[in-house]
Amino acid sequence: MTKIKLRGLKLLEGGAHVASSSPGDDNLLATGVCSPLARNKTNLTFLSHAFLDQGANCITAFCTEGSAGRAAASLVEAHHASTAIVDLHGDISILSVFPHEQRPQVVGVLLQVLARKEIILQGMASSPSAVSTIVSTAETEAAIDTFFEAFKFPAYRSPSDWYAAYEGKEHLLRKIIASYQEKVIRIYDIVQQSDLDLWSLTVAQSDLGDLGAALITLGQSEIRMVFVIALPSLENRLSFSFCLPEGGEAQIREVFSSHLGNTALTCHSQVAALYIHGPHFGDRYGISHALVKALESKGVSLLALGCTVSSLSVIVGEQDLDGAVQALEASFQRSSE
C-alpha cells in the first residue's frame, strides 16, 4: 500500500480526558461544561460535542492538563443532572497529523491502522489543517510507530528521527498554555462553508477498521470531509459525526452499507460549517464558552463542535448560518481589524 504523504505529527502528553453524556433535551454544553470550566480558569486542549440519535442524546468530551482532570470532571458532574454520565480517563495523549486536506482516506487509514494494532481510540476531532486522536499514554509509542507505518513524513525517516526532533521541545508546548484577559477575544479569521450534510453513526472499537475502509472508498471519489469528530459512547463504542458535501446521500449510504452492514447511519441535511482560528486557540480557557454564549444569544442551535490545535469548528443548520456569523463577529475581533 502506498503511504499517504503528510507534513507533520504533533504530540501533547500528560493529559486527562473527560466525557459526559445526557438526554438530548438537557443540553448543558454552556452551563454544564464551558461556563464552570471557564470560571475555574481550566484550559482545554481538546473539545468535541454532538447531538446524536436525531437529538435524543448529547455527548461532550474534552481534554485538560492531567493535574486538572479530576477537578474538571467534578465541576462538570456538579453542573449536570442526575441522568448524566460523566467519565474521567487520566494519563492520555493527543496525537495530531497534518495536513489532511479534507481527504476521508487520511482518517480512514488512521482508523484502520489503530484497529489493526488494537490501539484503543478514545476520541477524535479535526481542524481545517489537522486530525487529532486521543489514546492512552501507555499506547502512545505504539500509536506513533503505527502512524509511521501508514503515513510518510518527509522530514522524518523513522519514529526515531521524529523522537530526536521532539525531545527537548515538549516544554515549549507547555509554555503556550496560558490564560487571557482580553475583553474581546482576538482571532485570525472566520471561515464558512455551506451546502453540507452532517452524518452520524456509532460503532464498536472492533469495527473501526471497517469504518476506515468505508472512508477510504469515499476518498477514491475525491469527495471532501470537512469535519469529523468521534466521541466515547456506551459499551466501548464510539459515536462519529462528519460533514460531507450535500447531494451524495445514495452513494454514501451504499458505501457504508457495503462495509458496515446494517449499522444505523443518520443524515442531517442542509447544514453549514464555521471555522474560527486564533493564537493557541485550543489551549486557553474560556474561548469555547464565549463561542457557545454568542451562538445562544442569537438563538442558533449548535449541532456539533470540535476544537483541536488552534481552531474551533462549528456545525449549524444552514438557516442559522447568517445569525451564527453575526454572533461570532460581535463576540470576537479579527486581528486585522
Image (cartoon, rainbow, N blue to C red):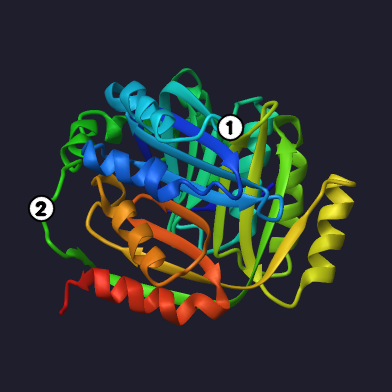
Asked whether, in this view, residue 152 is left or right of residue 248, the answer is left
Q: Mark 2 is on which residue type?
A: Gln
Identify which residue is drawn at 68% across, 39% down: 112
Image coords of residue 273 (percent x, y):
50, 69
Q: CA distance from mark 2 to mark 1?
A: 35 Å
Q: Earlier in the sequence, mark 2 or mark 1?
A: 1
SS assignment at label 2: loop
Q: Nearer the viewer, residue 54 or 148?
A: 54
Residue 336 numbered tag: none
Q: Nearer the viewer, residue 183 or 47?
A: 183
> From what the image shows, is residue 91 above or below residue 185?
above
SS assignment at label 1: loop
Location of the C terminus (image quadrant): bottom left
Residue farthest to the front?
82
Image coords of residue 32 (percent x, y):
41, 41
Image coords of residue 18 (percent x, y):
45, 31
> From what the image shows, is residue 57 above or below residue 320?
above
Mark 2 or mark 1: which is in front?
1
- Which residue bears the numbered disc 1? 83
Asked whether, in this view, residue 89 is left or right of residue 327, the answer is right
Identify which residue is drawn at 39% across, 50% down: 30
Q: Can residue 315 be seen at all in this image of the molecule?
A: yes
- Which residue bears the numbered disc 2? 181
Crowd rating for badge 2 (residues with CA inside 10 Å; few <14, some 14–19, many 20+): few
